[in-house]
Image (tube, helix red, strand yellow):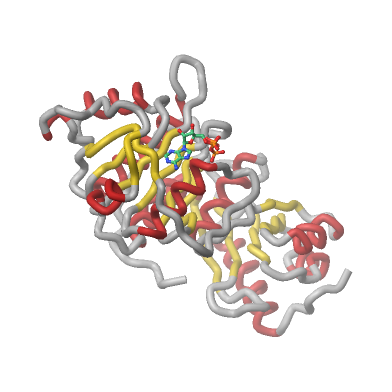
Amino acid sequence: MKRKKLNQQFENVLKSARRLADLESATAIIVLADVAFNFKTMKKMLRGIRLIVAAEEPHVQEAVKADEISLISLEHEPQTRGTQVSQMLLEAIADELLQSGDVVVAVYSSYEKDSCDTISVIRLAEQLAKLTSRDLQRLETQVPLETLRIVVDLACEIGREGREGKSVGTLFVVGNHRKVMSLSQEQVHDPFRGYARSERLIRSPRVRESIKELAQIDGAFIISADGVVQAAGRHLRASADDIVLSKGLGSRHWASAEISKATDAIAVAVSESTGTVRVFQDGKVVLRIEPMNSNMKWTDFETEPPET
Ligand SMILES: Nc1ncnc2c1ncn2[C@@H]1O[C@H](COP(=O)(O)OP(=O)(O)OP(=O)(O)O)[C@@H](O)[C@H]1O
């Protein structure tokens, strides 16, 4: 199998990562590889610490397996680097390659195509929830962070808990609600119709409880940027070109991608089959959250990370 040689810069980055891992008592170095490198050489360079490689491309995954290195297979879907990094950490925990109390050194590429140029020290316990929060903060959207957080929390709870022992999938479309309403139609009788604004505020725990109860109905919840349920049970009929989604995602996820491409809204889909929550913006998955056992603890980031 053809391999890309590690260039001098990459070797220097790996050596620095190795030193950093010692200083931080990290349990592993996790490399996000876009290219089939010689992973055996990489392992030799990092001797004394566990190497884990995360890869999205099937041929890179094959190379990692052939070199007998622990592999995290990432979903093949268009997503930001930040989303990929949080995804690889969550999957490493899910596969029991890492534990939530571990410190890891992550190596990935922010700028270079055939190399790695970025090192992060990540304390998993503190960072997992923050990564999610930060990713939400980074979405350049008119939708206030507070509204997004409430919807994402609610979506995660629905994905995790389901209803009466049954898994439940649902869809929220947040922001740009007039346009979203014009690109959708009533699919089932709207249970929120006729209620006063104060009875439709997602800030209210009672309203969130009703949403959980109603999540099983067909169609989408339409939420305005200020956090008011505008309608439920809407069938979205936006269409958009150039959407690429991973295999296995069906009509709910396509509808989410399309409405987020056709409008400035953010779509938040909960998969009925897996409980996974995906956040869509401009036709792409910008955040993916696997169902976890506990609630997320939101923490504000005071500094903005560099753009990826
Ligand atoms: N255009 C749409 N607008 C609103 N809701 C939709 C739309 N298309 C599908 N849905 C909702 O998605 C539900 C399930 O669709 P499907 O199983 O094809 O989705 P999926 O993407 O595979 O998601 P899941 O992982 O939850 O099965 C439908 O019952 C419906 O409630």
Above/below status of 203 relative to 128: above
Left or right, residue 28 beside residue 71: left
Counting from the top left corner in percent of width and height, residue 126 is at 43, 48
Q: Quadrant of residue 78?
A: bottom right
Answer with left or right where residue 248 lies relative to residue 145. right
- Residue 84 position, x and y percent, is 55, 58
* Foreground pick, 69 / 110: 110
Query: To which quarter of the image does residue 189 belong?
Result: top left
Q: Nearer the viewer, residue 21 or 128?
A: 128
Residue placed most toward the observer, 201 or 83:
201
Can residue 193 be seen here?
Answer: yes
Residue 222 screen position, x and y as percent: 29, 41
Q: Is residue 51 left or right of residue 242?
A: right
Picture residue at 66% right of the left edge, 77% below the top: 115
Q: Quadrant of the N terminus?
A: bottom right
Residue at 27%, 53% (x, y): give it: 179
Q: Residue at x 62, y 75 (%)?
A: 13
The one nearer the camera, 259 or 45, is 259
Tally the marks. Answer: 0
Quarter of the rendering containing residue 151:
top left
Q: Is residue 131 visible?
A: no
- Residue 71 point in image, percent of width and height: 73, 52
State the residue at coordinates (20%, 40%): 228
Q: Establish if 207 lies above or below 98.
A: above
Check the image and name the residue furthest to the bottom. Answer: 8
Q: What is the residue that sits farthest to the top in this orientation? A: 164
